[in-house]
């Protein structure tokens, strides 16, 4: 029989993403619904080490479902990577009477949580929060859908000025290891070409494609590039390359940067956060541990944290084809 | 061996929804990609009867991926319900050399398309476009995701003023037969209660819930109501009822109306439209007919139009529970 | 020599409007800048009577410059209309050591403030906050610019669906006594006709205009109507009238309602709020009282509260002509 | 007696800005209202040289009031700087029967127009369209208000992630010679410091200010920097400088770039565009030439183009003080 859970700690860690607040709210209210106490832990694992805790009732999370960022703050903790750090963190949890954890974040967050669980046999559940959508075991991470909307909104604006001047824009979006944002936002924004880490288009093919696009009568072009694109050049080098090889183009660069992490979450991300928070807490109540809650085939599921960390998401190759056809 | 398709007609019919333009663009460009001609048919089946056609090349759909509404216009056609109307429509298609149709719309659109196919053995593919998400055979209809974001944005604004004055708002959203918008946008917007056609909450329970909410220290409340809610009262009658029974509440009503149908589509709807358009045209090329393209488990699938029309979508009952917990 | 001000109270009263939080923030920080204490008074004059006060330092107003609504809440107070109520309020201020007031709101708020000043010789400054822009002595009230953007955004969405179906929409916007929102948002949204309290267009002319519009080849029409329009019919009666007289039109109605009061303030409203807050506090420090701070010819000015209350704003009649020309 | 104007040409030139389309629409419809023909000239002065003209009636500008960019496209023309180029342009106008010009753009556009007027005695009116607000003779240029809203929206998103991680962001906004965007959007977005071309804050003071900000308990900071800031370092050099001198800060950089030029215009810009277009055309009808229409003290006015070009706008120094107080 599982140990009865009486007090759950919740934290956000790693890069923040829209929907984290909605997930915190869901964890807090699900605890209240089941008459469990809930403790907010500030600044991720570092706050766990420093005992930076705050009791949270259902009214402490009023009016945050629509707020970007995380009210619990986030931080990276080098101290938590040491056994001493984790020991201190564990002592703080025990002292505070916390008997289970919900950790919201990405790979690094889950790795920390899993290690903590294995060392202290402490129940931990993970909620995937990152705009990059690069977590195995869930079709969507919290913040990904919002980031896609942010990116297409911005590229829509860039296209206004691109069309007015018949220009070519290279737009860099987030995604060091995963092209999900670039691929989906690129299709959504009507990009000519999309450069992602998973696929080396080749510089030749890029030039050809741009030439074809010009010949087909298009008055402006957008190329969307993931930070970690495989083509081996960053966005400014690409501009120089195209400047040198296609002088008929007037090329500009835009690096979207951190704005992609912020903003009020989309309805999808708010609902997803609410569902995942419920499942995380209720799984702890049922005695489960070391799972990530996620969305698969539109249903909330559990994936062992270990798999979530090791597994590799893949881009939907159908989308590469769709992108290709759309730029006809 | 299927008859070779040389010219595809595309139309939008019924209520418009965001993403229809992106779907038109996808159909047009997929045709161009496969060297098939494409004809835009204006004002749905009525334009088919009147021969209101226009040739469309890949450049005719520049810069519409992000536009709400439908550049092909929509209309309801009573004439198409008569055999004479459909005969005239068929003659026009033949005269124009069109040998297959893609129809974008909802139930009524598909019913018309299926009838047309059965009478003239004319290849027809359907793309589900309606904000209500009430089509069987697809987890998402075009425009639904956008409408959800529109609704939560508006309710966020209403909540600003609701909180400032400690008021209760009844917000009516679209959905005559289906509560998908109300249920998801209600959770996303942090609604106290959600009234939908699929579930009779009961007036008693509504009052109780509002009383409990007040007692729990909430300073304002939002109740989201689908047009076709089952409680048997419209939104103004509900206000009167609560005014009479809970005089401590200052109640206001907001009917969101047609704004829910408009606006630039979300990234999700743009990508979905692009995928569905490709699949619709390529299915025609493969000799298929009388299917609806849709999304199931994140994959593009085909559902016989007949099933799409007869089948009934159901709300996800997990969400009713999540809503209940979130309003703790 | 003016009495030295040591502690300023700030409140919001009447209908809330975007920018009120930015004004509160400005009052609080200007006080801090001048080493004056600042007390937030909750729920307007009612909170003054109940002693619902809270000390506010510069960090209490972090991250509210962009939030709609008012963190100090608003309320209407019937008790404050009685001499006993005001006496109690005055005693509370004295007890709390508050020696001057900044009141943010509209006509009613200023009337209360002026009365309070005259009865107790208590220094009061007013900041105009209402979306209606109907305050004399300022070209812009806080929230007006934001409301205009909210209204045109929504009408843009409505136009998407109006154009797709060749429909006529009557859109009702706020403005019981003043047509500023209707007139400006109507021009901004490309309305066919604009009905406002200041001008009786006449039903005949409306019909003529709509007929002319149809004849000119327009595919859809928007008519914007202020709540207090002078034509003598509400928006639903107008629909019935047009239905009866112009059956060729498919008419729909949309009442925008309270969403117009909410939302994140525009840059203009945030900057205006910041400027007005500084001026209000610094005027109190200089020993001034019973003025409204406002914007005239892009400069911050003072208008005696009495004039602000009695004076009547007028619509810019040039805009009526511009609207007329734009609907050519 | 002025020559009767029968056909007006309209063009956009230089950097595009939101509201240009609304101005084109206003020029076209005002012409129609006065029974004057209107010719759209594509790609600015270059299109004038190439005879790239198109007749425009009131229906050619349907549904563009809310669109960013310019449907007439813009371009820079080196050929127009030569007497031969201008001669060719003049011949094209004469051949097309155009007897007056409305040019929409900035300084360079007006300089071209004035030269053209002086050489050929050809009536020209200017409409100020640029997001930078750096034109003398108008309090607002078309697109400026929209750009301010775009910038604060983006910085609001950046602040979400800045607050979650206690970071410092340097945000670069447009404005090579003028700090209007930086100053107003900086105040609107609650920036700690604002660096503009008109004022050398000094690196020392920047460091002090950031230290004070940290000491005061602020958890995150935004510094807004105009492209042409006077401090003598670009945004990346500033980051390096602060990294070296204030290691306690985690500094990030965001360069907003061209997105600032795009997007649907704000209500203010749409109304302003409508007013200026009417005035430009009606001034030509009255026989006036070589003026810029603009907004001064909320009224539409005329300023000789020569003054508009030579005059220098100044920032409102009151705002520097407001910014200083707001960052308390």
Image (tube, coloured by chain):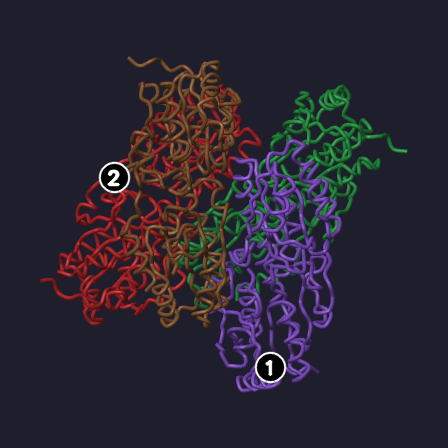
Chain colours: A red, B brown, C purple, D green
SS label for mark 1 = loop
Which label sits on residue C99? 1
Q: Relative to B81, is C2 above or below?
A: below
Which label sits on residue A24? none
Q: Chain of mark 2?
A: A
Label 2 vs label 1: CA separation? 63 Å
Quick check: can you spot residue C10? no
**Quarter-wise, where is residue C266 in the image?**
bottom right
Q: Relative to B310, is A262 above or below?
A: below
Residue drawn 37% across the image and 63% down it: B203
Left or right, residue A25 beside residue B237 = left
Quick check: can you spot residue C13? yes
Residue at the disc numbered 2: A313
Q: Relative to the observer, which residue lies in front, C81 or C49? A: C81
* Location of residue B293 in the rendering, given as x and y in whole percent from the top left corner: 33, 30
Task: Determine the residue located farthest toward the right in the rendered image.
Answer: D1
Tell me whether circle 2 and circle 1 mark residues in contact (CB < 8 Å): no
Left or right, residue A78 beside residue C120 = left
Quarter containing the C terminus of chain C: top right
* Location of residue A184 in the rendering, given as x and y in whole percent from the top left corner: 37, 36
* Tag 2 and tag 1 share a subunit: no
- Neighbour class for label 2 at 10 Å: few (<14), some, many (≥20)? some
Left or right, residue C28 beside residue B206 = right
Q: Relative to A306, is B54 above or below?
A: above
- Neighbour class for label 1 at 10 Å: few (<14), some, many (≥20)? some
Q: Relative to the observer, which residue lies in front, C20 or C193? A: C193
Q: Chain of mark 1?
A: C
Task: Determine the residue located farthest toward the left in the rendered image.
Answer: A1
* Location of residue A71 in the rendering, given as x and y in whole percent from the top left corner: 37, 61
* Location of residue B306 in the rendering, given as x and y in whole percent from the top left corner: 31, 31
Quarter containing the N terminus of chain C: bottom right
Question: How many numbered discs, if any?
Answer: 2
């Amino acid at each position: 029989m599982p140990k009865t859970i009486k007090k759950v700690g919740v934290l956000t860690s790693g890069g923040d993403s829209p929907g984290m607040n909605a997930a915190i709210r869901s964890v807090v209210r699900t605890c209240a619904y089941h008459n469990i106490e809930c403790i907010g832990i500030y600044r991720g694992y570092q706050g766990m080490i420093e005992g930076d805790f705050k009791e949270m009732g259902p009214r402490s999370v009023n009016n945050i479902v629509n707020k970007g960022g995380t009210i619990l703050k986030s931080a990276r903790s080098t101290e938590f990577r040491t056994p001493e750090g984790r020991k201190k963190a564990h002592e703080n949890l025990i002292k505070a009477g916390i008997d289970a954890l919900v950790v919201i974040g990405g790979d690094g967050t889950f790795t920390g949580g899993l290690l903590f669980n294995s060392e202290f046999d402490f129940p931990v559940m993970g909620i995937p929060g990152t705009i990059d959508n690069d977590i195995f075991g869930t079709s969507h991470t919290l913040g990904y859908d919002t980031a896609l909307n942010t990116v297409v909104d911005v590229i829509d604006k860039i296209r206004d000025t691109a069309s007015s001047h018949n220009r070519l824009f290279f737009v860099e979006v987030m995604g060091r290891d995963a092209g999900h944002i670039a691929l989906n936002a690129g299709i959504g924004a009507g990009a000519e070409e999309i450069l992602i880490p998973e696929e080396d288009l080749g510089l030749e093919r890029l030039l050809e494609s741009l030439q074809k696009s010009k010949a087909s009568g298009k008055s402006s072009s957008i190329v969307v590039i993931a930070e970690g694109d495989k083509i081996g050049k960053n966005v400014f080098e690409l501009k120089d390359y195209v400047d040198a090889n296609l002088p008929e183009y007037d090329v500009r660069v835009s690096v979207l940067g951190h704005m992609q992490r912020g903003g009020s979450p989309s309805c999808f991300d708010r609902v997803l956060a609410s569902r995942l928070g419920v499942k995380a807490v209720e799984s702890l109540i049922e005695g489960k541990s070391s799972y990530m809650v996620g969305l698969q085939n539109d249903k909330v599921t559990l994936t062992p944290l270990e798999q979530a960390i090791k597994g590799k998401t893949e881009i939907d190759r159908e989308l590469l084809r769709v992108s290709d056809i759309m730029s006809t």
